[in-house]
Image (cartoon, helix red, strand yellow):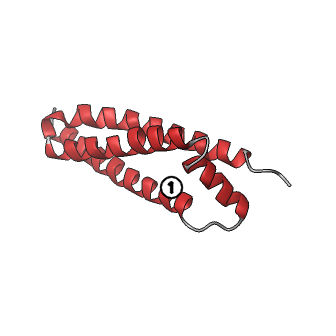
Amino acid sequence: GSPDSKTLSTFFTVVLLLASVVHVGLVLIEIFGSHVNSHVATAARYMSRGGLRRIFWGLFLLIGSFVPLALLSLALLLPGAQAVLLGIAGICALIGLFAYEHCFVVAGQIVPLS
């Protein structure tokens, strides 16, 4: 493409890379950090070690976070393949975001109300 499209592609690659790093960091702090009460701790355990662990570790962390981080890093090193790698990384990141939101909602609902 033109120089402008390459600059824009690089910009989006860097933005998605940085946003993914921040998101993974915040999620890991939320799951493994200290919790304000036992209900939040129970929900976090259910997400990371309980019934949602495969979705959390597999879809969110592996497919939706680590794969995009690797693809985006590679995209910055291989400008010729940047657009394709950015597209695949974006799709994987959306899968990860959906998986995390699913875990977040379901884990919050398994905690007893009283």
How many residues crowd around disc 1 within 10 Å: few (fewer than 14), some, or many (20 or more)?
A: few
Residue depicted at x 61% and y 54%: 44
> How many labels sit on residues?
1
* Left or right for 8, reference 42: left
Residue depicted at x 39% and y 50%: 20
Question: Is 102 in front, or is 6?
Answer: 102
Question: Is 90 in front, or is 95?
Answer: 95
Please identify the residue farthest to the right as the structure is shown: 114
**Amino acid bearing label 1:** Val
Q: Position of residue 96 (x, y in %)?
A: 46, 40
**For the C terminus, which image quadrant?**
bottom right
Question: Is 75 in front, or is 70?
Answer: 70
Residue marked by disc 1: 27
Residue depicted at x 80% and y 50%: 112
Q: Against 84, is 44 above or below?
A: below
**For the N terminus, which image quadrant?**
top left
* Left or right for 66, reference 35: left
Q: Under tag 1, what secondary structure?
A: helix
Q: Position of residue 85 (x, y in %)?
A: 25, 35
* Left or right for 43, reference 25: right
Q: Position of residue 22 (x, y in %)?
A: 42, 57
Q: Against 28, is 83 above or below?
A: above
Residue 75 occupies quadrant: top left
Residue depicted at x 45% and y 37%: 94
Residue 7 visible from this viewpoint = no
Q: Position of residue 89 (x, y in %)?
A: 33, 37
Q: Against 113, is 71 above or below?
A: above
Residue 17 visible from this viewpoint = yes
